[in-house]
Every structure is written in structure tokens, then in C-alpha cells.
Amino acid sequence: MKKIFITLSILALTATACKQQTEKLEVISTEEATTTSTPEETPADGTQFKSEALTQVFHKLDGSTITFQEILAQYTGKNILIDVWAAWCPDCIKALPEIKKIKAEFPDVVFVNLSLDKTPEAWKEAITKYGIEGEQFHLNDEKRMKGTFGQAIELNWIPRYIVINKEGKIELFNATEKNFGEIKALLNTLQ
């Protein structure tokens, strides 16, 4: 009788645990389903980045640091395509050939690559391995997408592309690899 009771108890606990796991998966699936790749023209506060984003410190290839605001200021008077990426992101790596085509088509656009890699070594290795062109910066934040910078730019997916015009205003705030057509069309109008 004890064996039957123990067996039934184990089965009940297993069924409960499976139900809870299924509910968790449904919540995750629902959250993923609400994430879209539709580009947003501007962030909530207009055509400028939030101050939390602008004050974020990035690392340069030589190990020195620079704020996001200083990165943008370097390219005043030029159109900028920002690529937020990471070497551990398969979609980021798959998108690189198309980014290279866009770079060749728009040689006057500055390509700013903001890496979310876990270590500077992984970031630098990926730049070499994949031949990533453009200006390179690394965000050394262990929370990466969920950190201060990620929250300030409403980052929910990478690769993430942002287009800045020559006046330093955001033209396209939220684009993914599914929006390359819109990115190219916009860059054509900004030339």
C-alpha cells in the first residue's frame, strides 16, 4: 500500500511540475510573439537618444573608453548606421554579408558597430574572424541587452540597426535584419 501511495505522489508531483513548466513556456512564447521586427521611426522622446544611452561608456579597440555621445559627435555631418551585435548571436553573423553589401552601396555612411560580447577578447576575435568593417566599440556590461544602455535604446533583439542623419537626429530607431529594404531606402533618401 505504501508503494502505491508513493507512486501516486510522485506522479502527482511530476504532473504538477510539467504543468508549471508548460505554463512558463507559454508565457515565454507569448512574450516572443509580441516582439515584432517592425521598424520604429523614433524613440519615445523624439529624434534624440535618452541621456542614459548617451552617457554609456564603451571600449575602443585600443582599450581606451568613450561615451556613446562622444562616438556620435565624432561623425557629426555624416549619416550613421549603428549595428548592435554580438559574436554569440547567430542572426548577427548571418546578417554580416548583407551589411557588407550595404556598406559597399553607401560608402559615405559611417558604420558604427556596438558589440555586446561577453569579453573584449571574443569581440576582437569576431571582428577578425568575420572581417567586420566600420568603427568598433564594445559595451562591457554584464547585463548586456538588459543593462542601462539596452534599456535606454529599448533593445529587445539583436542585431539591431539604428540610422542617424547628418544632423545627428534619429531617422530609424528600431530595425532588425528583416528591415534591410527599409534601411537601404532610407539611406538613399538621406544622401
Image: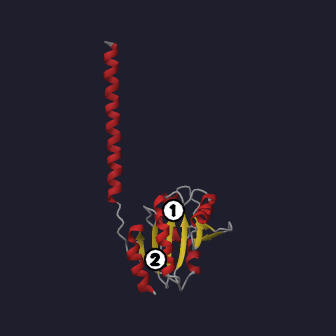
Query: Residue 110 at what x, y percent from top left?
Result: 54, 79
User: Which of these two is toward me, 68 or 19?
Assistant: 19
Q: Say what secondary structure mark 2 lies in.
A: strand
Q: Which residue is drawn at 42% across and 67% down?
A: 177
User: Which of these two is toward me, 45 or 86?
Assistant: 86
Q: Can residue 8 be spotted in the picture?
A: yes
Neighbours of disc 2 within 10 Å: few (<14), some (14-19), many (20+)? many
Q: Which of marks 2 and 1 is nearer the N terminus?
A: 1
Q: What residue type is labelled 1?
A: Thr
Q: Distance between the residues labelled 2 and 1?
A: 20 Å
The residue mark sitting in front, 2 or 1, is 2
Numbered badge on residue 97 = none
Look at the image and tell me in which quarter the N terminus lies. top left
67 up-or-down from 189: above or below: above
Left or right relative to 120: residue 2 = left
Query: Residue 62 at what x, y percent from top left?
Result: 68, 68
Numbered badge on residue 148 = 1
Q: Mark 2 points at which residue?
A: 163
Query: Residue 58 at what x, y percent from top left?
Result: 60, 67
Q: Which residue is drawn at 34% across and 63% down?
A: 36
Q: Which residue is drawn at 54% across and 70% down?
A: 113
User: Which of these two is toward me, 183 or 9?
Assistant: 183
Query: Residue 70 at what x, y percent from top left?
Result: 59, 76
